[in-house]
């Protein structure tokens, strides 16, 4: 996914869902939220806190409520796109202009703003410490360039590599994975960088 410097730039690059995204933007701008770009996509904030994001994929477009799990969601329209991983974020997925319910969106945004005003939020949990598999430790010891690059990676990117190797049950699978990732580590990229949106 490409990065964008402004919401206008984000919208200008859309080939799918452009009209629908413009309509959602209009609703969000009418709520008093501040419009910005984070992670390359439109995000709307209140008092510096992320409230709702705007985005689109091939099969749907929609809104991402950063504290959506705390919303009453009486209409049961919000979903957790990463069940078991995402605690607070909830999506409102739409597939046509006809599905855009202005009053519903305004009500959900008003409730989300109220949560910010009251200081109610789900804080991200601390990740468990990880242990580097012996095979990866040995490979990094031998490959100095990769070791230096690994140490310069963010803790999250280090964790991705460690978990990728550790999740292999068999020794030969771990060895193949290490052979695959050593050049990536040496070049300073994260295992999942190509999937990151911003």
Image (cartoon, rainbow, N blue to C red):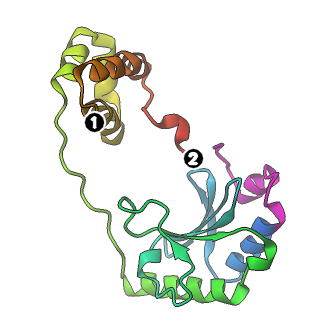
Which dot marks residue 167? 1
- Where residue 153 sits, quadrant-wise, is top left
Give the residue at x 70% y 55%: 6
| Residue 4 is inside the magenta segment | yes
The stretch of residues the image draws in magenta is 1-19
Give the residue at x 69% y 90%: 103
**Mark 2 or mark 1: whose residue is earlier in sequence:** 1
Q: Is residue 194 left or right of residue 31?
A: left
Measure the C-alpha gap from mark 2 to mark 1: 25 Å
Q: Position of residue 141 (x, y in %)?
A: 20, 14
Which dot marks residue 195? none
Above or below for 71 versus 187: below
| Residue 197 is inside the magenta segment | no
Looking at the rendered structure, the secondary structure element under dot 1 is: loop
Give the residue at x 36% y 76%: 121
Q: Position of residue 71 (x, y in %)?
A: 46, 83
Above or below for 47 versus 189: below
Count of labels shown? 2
Above or below for 29 versus 42: below
CA neighbours of label 2 inside 10 A, class few (<14), some (14 to 19), many (20+): few
Q: Marks 2 and 1: which is nearer the front?
A: 1
- Please say if the residues under marks 2 and 1 sit with CB atoms less than 8 Å apart: no
Q: Position of residue 73 (x, y in %)?
A: 51, 85
Looking at the rendered structure, the secondary structure element under dot 2 is: loop
Give the residue at x 35% y 61%: 84
State the quadrant of the N terminus. top right
Q: Position of residue 61 (x, y in %)?
A: 69, 63
Residues 40 and 167: in front is 167
Which dot marks residue 197? 2
Q: Is residue 75 left or right of residue 140?
A: right
């Amino acid at each position: 996914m490409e990065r964008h410097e402004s919401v206008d730039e984000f919208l200008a690059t859309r080939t799918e869902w452009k009209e629908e995204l413009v309509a959602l933007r209009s609703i969000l701008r009418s709520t008093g939220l501040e419009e910005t770009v984070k992670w390359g996509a439109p995000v709307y904030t209140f008092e510096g806190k992320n409230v709702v994001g705007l985005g689109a994929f091939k099969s749907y477009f929609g809104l991402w409520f950063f504290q959506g799990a705390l919303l009453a969601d009486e209409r049961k329209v919000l979903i957790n796109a990463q069940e078991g991983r995402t605690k607070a974020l909830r999506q409102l997925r739409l597939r046509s202009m006809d599905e855009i319910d202005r009053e519903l969106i305004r009500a959900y945004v008003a409730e989300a703003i109220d949560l910010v005003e009251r200081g109610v939020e789900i804080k991200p949990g601390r990740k468990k410490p990880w242990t580097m598999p012996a095979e990866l430790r040995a490979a990094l010891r031998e490959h100095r360039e990769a070791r230096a690059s690994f140490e310069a990676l963010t803790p999250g990117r280090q964790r991705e590599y460690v978990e990728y190797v550790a999740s292999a049950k068999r020794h030969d699978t771990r060895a193949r994975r290490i052979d695959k990732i050593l050049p990536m580590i040496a070049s300073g990229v994260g295992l999942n960088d190509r999937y990151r949106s911003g």
